[in-house]
Structures are given as C-alpha cells and as structure tokens.
Image: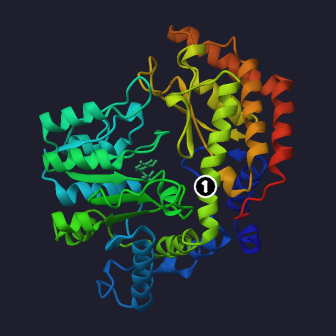
Amino acid sequence: MQKLQNSDPEIYEILKAEEDRQLKGMTLIPSENHTSKEVLEALTSVLSDKYAEGYPGKRYYAGNEYADKLETLVQDRAKRLFGVPYANVQPYSGSPANLVIFSALLEVGDKIMGLNLLDGGHLTHGWKFSMTSKFWQSVPYHMTSEGAIDMEEVRRLAREEKPKIIICGGTAIPRAIPFKEFAEIADEVGAYLLADVSHIAGLIAGGAHESPVPYAHLVMTTTHKTLRGPRGAMIMVTDKGLAKDEELPEKIDKALIPGLQGGPHLNTIAGIGVALSEDAKPEFKEYASRVVANAKTLADELKEKGFELVSGGTDNHLILIDLTNTGVGRGAFFHEGLERIGIYTNKNTVPGDLSSPFYPSGLRIGTPAVTTRGMGEAEMKQIAEWIYRFASHIKDIKLPEDKAERKQVIKDFRVSLKSDGFYDELRAEVESMCEKFRVPGV
Ligand SMILES: Cc1ncc(COP(=O)(O)O)c(C=O)c1O
C-alpha cells in the first residue's frame, strides 16, 4: 500500500489500523471470515472499472468480452460446487438477493413465511421493519423453548396461511436445518421452498452440513461468510425448482436486472470465482469439518463452565449463549466487554427473550474466522476460559429496567472498561495468542 500511504495517508492509516485490529484480536462473529490474498487481489483488480449491465452475450455496454468470460466461468464454478443447473452471481449482497427472489416469484401482497427475526431469522425474511413485510404479508414461524425450529408450527401455519414461499435458514440457528421436512410441508401446500444458506454454505460445500439442493426450489447464499469469498451473493435454482417452473432462471435474471440492480460488480464476481475454486479443494473440506469441530469444543467447554446454550450445543459453526440465567438483557455487556479485550462477538436475542433486540439476553459466537487462522482445540479451550473469566468479573452487573438507572449502569460499565486493569491484562493475553496465527489477507 506504498502508493496509498504517500497519496492518502488518512485512509492508509485507517486501513493499517484495521489490519492491526484483525491481527491482534479474534473474530468470533459467526457471519465473518478472512478471505485469501488471492480473493483480495481479484477484488482490487481493474474489473472494478467496468460496466457490464446485462448478462453474458447480452450487455448494454461495449468492451465486455472478458466480463462475459468471467461471469460464465464463475456461474459454472457455482453450479459445479453446489450441483445446480443455474446460478446468478450478480447480487450485490444477501439482502438484495432475497428481494430479487421475492419479486421474481410473488405479486405484491402475497404471503411469505420465514423464521421470526428474534428467533434467528434474517431481516429480509419478513421482519416488521424490513421492506419485505411492506410489499408482502409476513407469516413468521418461531423456535421452540428448547431452541429447535418449531416444525409443528411451520406445518400448521403453512396449511392455514398457504404462503407462496417458505424460507428456511437464518442468522442464529445453531442446529442442522431439516430441509427434507421443510420440503414436505412446502410441497404439500404448493409453496416454493427457498433455502437461505448464507451462514452455512461453506459447510455445505465442504460436506459438513446436508445440502438443501435435493429439497429446495431455490438456494440463496451470501459469499462472504463460511464460503470465504468477498461480500456478495448468489441465487441458484435446483433441478427440483426447474421441474416446478422451467422459467425460474429467466424470472430471477429479469427480477435482478432490470428489476432491482444495475451494473454488476465484476471485481466482486472475480473474487467470488476465486473463492469458489478454493472451496472446491480437498483442503476446504478439512476446513469445514474443523469449523464444526472447533464450535463443538468451544460449546462443550462453555457448558462445562456453567454457560447455558440455546439448544444445548451446536451442529454447525455457531453457538448462541443464553445469558438469561444471570439476568435478562446482559448480552450488550458481553459484546462490549469482550470487544475491549480483543474478542469480537455480537449480542443477540435468544428464543423467547424477555428483553429487547438492543439489550438482548444472548451472545452469538462462531468459529469460521478463527478456524481460517488455524486455531484448534487448545485455542477453543483458551477462548472459553477468557469468556468465563470475563463473565465472572462482571457477574454483579445487571441491566436495570428503569431507563435512567440503566443509562447510569451502562455509563459506569464503560468507564470501568477504560480504567480497570483487569481488561488490560486479558487483552494482553488475547493479543499474545493471536499474534501466533496469521490473517491470510494481511
Ligand atoms: C441468513 C441471511 N440471509 C441474508 C443475509 C443478508 O446478507 P447481507 O448482509 O449481505 O445483505 C444475511 C446476513 O447476515 C443472513 O445471515
């Protein structure tokens, strides 16, 4: 970054500081990962300069010979990796990709059925503040109090409400998604089944989670989570989808452009292509199984130390700690306090949360990024130990219901994060471990 350092030191300093943050701390946010240097090279290529509205062979701009080659190649890699007959690699990200799918298949006012946001669904699956619930009628389903998707409710609601599309998948589901059961329900009521596998696509590609392809009509995934690509998304149609509606590919293509997007980000598409090729290698299979093994070790260690986990554990890359037994609404203290010592997590609601999404009672953690850095069993045990020491240190801090009192408690907590030497000590320990593990892009 020599040139940038000379020409724009302000931006350069920010980029260097972010590299330093990533190196000296650890990302336990389950939706984040570290891409390879090669993916980053593709992302910063001159493809960033090119407009290519349309699709290979049908563009609105001249000079797209190589854009056509690239997009066709990346589509082919996606099709091969997931075993599907169609893939659109142009969505800017997961949220617009879901909008593309809904607008391709539904009329305004039709019903969509997805997991409730507070139970682990995504905003775009019909949450009340998302455009998806303004254009379409949202029929949310929930988790049981044991932390499993309530399949009885899914069946009952599907029969009663007859949604046009059922979405399975989400952002905070620690257990395997029962694609087959979802498919039986969708088929019974004549709905499309969309598997939004944004979180687990890398596990599917690496054979560490069942594939939805035999069961769903459409599969959507972001490319920047367990798939380890750049920020983007892909929409795929399965053979089952084609059998239900042979025009699905055309409908998706049109809903994307001219329906929702303009020019595709070719540099991102190149980065996705590089990642998909990495994801097809035997080493990636090993990576996927290590992600799950690490999550299981971390979950077991946390349980041993007295933490309660939603659903009692994990089948995938993600763990949801339910902190309710130590007081409701304490997720934010963990999120901020762990950040102070270089452990990045995120506060999250838990099924049946008695608090609000801003002060939820859970903490969501995951192992994709630390596994990419090469951390294993010993490090997972150490991470659990740090979380435990932190939790013991703040055990007496509770979130008051009264707003003024709450404000004061949060203020005092933030002051203590700066002044209490305990946090410096823990941060030094975290840094010293992190320094032993490379971040591939740095
Ligand atoms: C299940 C699921 N769907 C969709 C999205 C939206 O993706 P993006 O943030 O790229 O818009 C996410 C991102 O968190 C997700 O987890």
The percent coordinates of residue 336 (x first, y second) are 65, 31
| Residue situated in front as seen by the camera: 408 or 361 | 361
| 207 on left or right of 369 | left
Q: Quadrant of residue 240?
A: bottom left
Q: Residue at x 53, y 16 (%)?
A: 328
Q: Mark 1: which secondary structure?
A: helix
Image position of 211 with respect to 346: above or below: below
Between 19 and 411, the residue placed more toward the observer is 19
Q: Badge 1: how crowded within 10 Å, few (<14), some, or many (20+)? A: some
Q: Inspect the image, locate mark 1, and give the three-letter code of the amino acid beneath it.
A: Ser
Q: Residue at x 16, y 63 (%)?
A: 244
Please say if 303 is above or below 278: above
Q: How is the image coloured?
A: rainbow
The spot of residue 100 in percent (x, y) is 28, 59
Which residue shows up at 16% across the image and 66% down it?
245
Residue 435 visible: yes
Q: Where does label 1 land, which residue?
A: 289
Looking at the rendering, in which quadrant would you find the N terminus? bottom right
Question: Visible in this render: residue 368?
Answer: no
Res 338 → quadrant: top right
Indicate the quadrant containing the C terminus: top left, top right, bottom left or bottom right: bottom right
Decide which of 187, 104 is in the foreground and name it. 187
Q: Position of residue 147 (x, y in %)?
A: 44, 29
The image position of residue 343, as x and y in percent, is 71, 39
